Image (cartoon, rainbow, N blue to C red):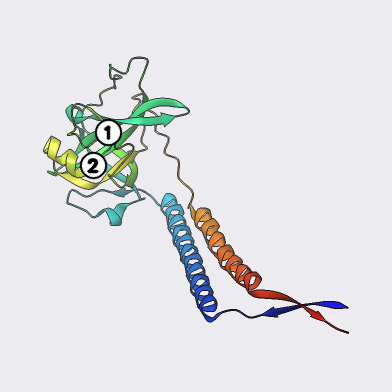
């Protein structure tokens, strides 16, 4: 009678390689979990900011980190001659622009760029859609955000005209010659100018990191299973 028998005899190098890969996969999974925790904490902070009253943007230079994601109000006057149109912005399936205009801060040599909202490109892209000019002193309220906006990067050519693919604050300062605060204001206050200001607050994005973590942990488990399967030997032992 033949009795099926198994033996587990892994090589030393196979053991070492398996241990190394399992450790790497586990550490990567733990790193993704820590990133998810950071994003959740950041999202909770945003939720707290949303419940707080608007703070005034001072006339002196600030740091982005002190104002980012906060609701901010600032008084000043628009400089429409420096308005640019940020291309490739979609709203409800329609192509359009984000209209960006600098605001000269009252009693200050500084300016702040204001993303005033979305407008459709219209049927003829060779003609820029008209914007209602808002003249005189006004108070603008909005969310302070990073001034760097990157949509497309099709070439490295120097910016020409009023339509920009991407927004870079340093480049904008060089083109306009204006001294800027290091942030962009996503306008919330209404000016009856026909622009659509629909700034959706994003979720934390932590679920994506948790998904990555699960994948890394699964790879660690899979590595162990493969190691066991490949190192289990079968032999037949004959018993009289």
Q: Residue at x 55, y 59 (%)?
A: 215
Q: CA distance from mark 1 to mark 2?
A: 12 Å
Q: Residue at x 14, y 36 (%)?
A: 175
Rate crowding at label 1 as few (under 14), some (14 to 19) or many (20 or more) other CA atoms within 10 Å.
many
Q: Nearer the viewer, residue 56 or 19?
A: 19
Q: Nearer the viewer, residue 95 or 102?
A: 95
The image quarter in which residue 80 lies:
top left
Label ID, residue 100: 1
Rate crowding at label 2 as few (under 14), some (14 to 19) or many (20 or more) other CA atoms within 10 Å.
few
Q: Residue at x 83, y 78 (%)?
A: 3
**Which of the two discs, 1 and 2, labels the residue nearer the N terminus?**
1
- Which of the image's four quarters has the C terminus? bottom right
The x, y position of residue 183, in whole percent, is: 26, 47
- Which of the image's four quarters has the N terminus? bottom right
Q: Residue at x 24, y 33 (%)?
A: 101
On the rendered structure, is 237 left or right of 30? right
The x, y position of residue 206, in whole percent, is: 50, 56
On the rendered structure, is 159 left or right of 45? left
* Residue furthest out toward the bottom: 240
The x, y position of residue 39, in whole percent, is: 45, 58
Q: Nearer the viewer, residue 194 or 224?
A: 224
Q: Which residue is mark 2?
A: 168
């Amino acid at each position: 009678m033949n009795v099926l028998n198994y033996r587990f005899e892994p090589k030393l190098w196979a053991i070492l390689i398996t241990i190394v890969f399992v450790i790497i996969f586990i550490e990567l999974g733990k790193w993704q979990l820590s990133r998810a925790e950071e994003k959740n904490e950041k999202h909770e902070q945003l939720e707290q900011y949303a419940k707080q009253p608007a703070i005034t943007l001072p006339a002196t230079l600030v740091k982005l980190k002190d104002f980012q994601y906060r609701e901010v109000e600032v008084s000043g006057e628009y400089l429409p001659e420096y308005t640019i149109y940020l291309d490739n912005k979609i709203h409800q399936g329609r192509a359009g622009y984000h209209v960006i205009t600098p605001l000269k801060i009252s009693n200050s040599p500084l300016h702040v760029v204001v993303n005033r909202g979305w407008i459709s490109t219209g049927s003829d892209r060779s003609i820029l859609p008209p914007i209602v000019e808002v003249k005189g002193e006004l108070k603008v309220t909005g969310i302070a955000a990073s001034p760097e906006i990157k949509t497309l990067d099709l070439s490295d050519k120097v910016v020409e005209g009023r339509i920009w693919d991407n927004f870079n604050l340093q480049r904008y300062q060089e083109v306009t010659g204006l001294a800027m605060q290091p942030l962009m204001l996503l306008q919330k206050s209404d000016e009856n100018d026909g622009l659509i200001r629909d700034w959706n607050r994003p979720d934390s994005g932590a679920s994506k990191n948790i998904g990555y973590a699960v994948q890394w942990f699964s790879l660690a488990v899979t590595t162990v299973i493969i190691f066991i399967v490949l190192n289990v030997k079968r032999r037949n032992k004959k018993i009289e």
